[in-house]
Amino acid sequence: MKSFSPALHLLVTVAWLWAAAYMIFFYAPREATMGEVQRIFYIHVAAAWTALLAYFLIFLGSVAYLWRRSAGADALARAAGEAGFVFCTGVLVTGPLWAKPVWGIWWTWDARLTLTFVLWLLFAAYLMLRSYVIQRDRAALLAAVVGVMGFVDVPIDYMAIRWWRTQHPQPVIAGGEGSGLDPRMWITLLVTWGAFLCLFSYLVRQHLRLAAVARQTSELRRQTAGGR
Amino acid sequence: MRTARVIWAIVMKDLRVEWRRRETLAGMCMFGLLAVFLFNFAFEPAREETLRLLPGLLWVAFAFAGVMGFNRSFAAEGENSGLEGMRLAPVDPGAIYLGKMLANLFFLGIAEVVVVCAASLWYNFSFVPALGRFALVTFLCTLGYVAVGTTFGAIAANTRMREVMLPALQFPVAVPVFIAGVEASTAALRGGSGSDYASWVRLAAGFSVIFLAVSYMLFEYVLEE
Amino acid sequence: MCNAYLVLAYTLLWSLFALYSWVIHRRQQRLENELRELKRELGGLRQ
């Protein structure tokens, strides 16, 4: 991992993003009914999948922290939390911009959107908790508990919201599950997701580096305070 | 069994403290009543619509009354270093959780009864025909809600802005029991086939069991110094 | 074909990423400055 320097990582990320952009605009076919606006679909879905992965990483980091109390696990959870929140916000921003021109409405409380918004709330609450805890050294522990509980909640939320929506159907945006996708679209989507994962891992790495520096700093702060 | 005695001790302590001051319970009931009262200006349901709106209205009132209760439950401990005492005592943290949870359940239950009676009166709506099923689903959903709320209340007690922090944590996580409460209540009050009702009840029961277990296991970390 | 919504969606998303990158960058600079300060202080104390 040492050989994969941050600068190289950034370069690969940018290159991959450009490749994805090219594929989105020139390789992927123009969608029949929706037109050009449909190209939002790629970044929208890729961001959503990345946000879900981020939430899973919060869970892994939280469990690892509860088990081992390693600062690295806590830093990972926090990094995934921040980056995941950014990606999730991206999903909620690109979604309505795609929905309005195509389906005529900005938003609908269908199962998928409702769940996405709940996920966003969970990210936000997780980050708020980390900022608002009064005793800083307890923040990691409390956040880890929330990280675990939140993740356990997601599948139950998914079930409950879907049942709720089958009882009171609303207009569904973006087609149902398994609506057909041209193979070229699939490839473009996967490439875009790869690019986003690259960006996500880069942001997480930057955050982890920052956390390590912060640990050094607080250690030194303690030493100077002791020395005075 | 020592654990059971600890749980009982905590429940009795919370009840006794509340009996003396009666602040929390009064506050929760008042909050719930005010919510229902305000709804009267928000919607004026005609007879047929009442059934559609009432369960949702009730659960919003329950949700906010509950949050108020969870906040007070641990804020009061902080004022007298009650949590300190509990931490230092050689008791299973899970037992502390269950004790607190049961006390919260009791208080929220009373507040819910008050709110339901008021709503029944103000909207001229009788719950009696479906009382059994309504009570069951409300109990299960409240159990799940309190299971999560007790843990998050304890966590939020460590934060600034806990009046915001607690709902921010609680509401997204409690979405399943909220939906189940509203949907199953509607199904019960409407009469008719029981399959919808049964599904939601099962969801609420599953949610409660899962989060009671998870909270029981994780509570030691919440209490940890 | 330049659809306004399309442009807006991409612009906003990249702005979000850029904003977050900048936030991290600023945090990093602030921390590195503080680290340098502390090291200097510590070096001074040791003398």
Image (cartoon, helix red, strand yellow):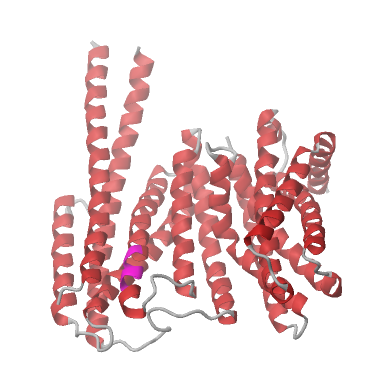
**A16 or A6: nearer the viewer:** A16
Within the image, what quadrant is residue A228 found in?
top left
Residue at the (38%, 60%) spot, across then down: A54
Residue B210 belongs to the span the image colors magenta: no
Overall secondary structure of the magenta section: helix
Above or below: residue A189 compared with residue B145:
below
User: Can residue B151 be seen in the rendering of this structure?
Assistant: yes
Above or below: residue A103 compared with residue B75:
below
Quadrant into which the C terminus of chain B falls: top right
Above or below: residue B148 compared with residue A93:
above
x then y, percent, for residue A221 = 34, 24
x then y, percent, for residue A43 = 27, 69
The span picked out in magenta is: A93-98
Residue at the (70%, 28%) spot, across then down: B80
x then y, percent, for residue C9 = 26, 66
Q: In this view, does B104 lie to the left or right of C4?
A: right
**B191 or A133: nearer the viewer:** B191
User: Can residue B146 be seen in the rendering of this structure?
Assistant: no
**B57 or B216: nearer the viewer:** B57
x then y, percent, for residue B154 = 62, 43
Within the image, what quadrant is residue A93 found in?
bottom left
Residue at the (27%, 82%) spot, across then down: A186
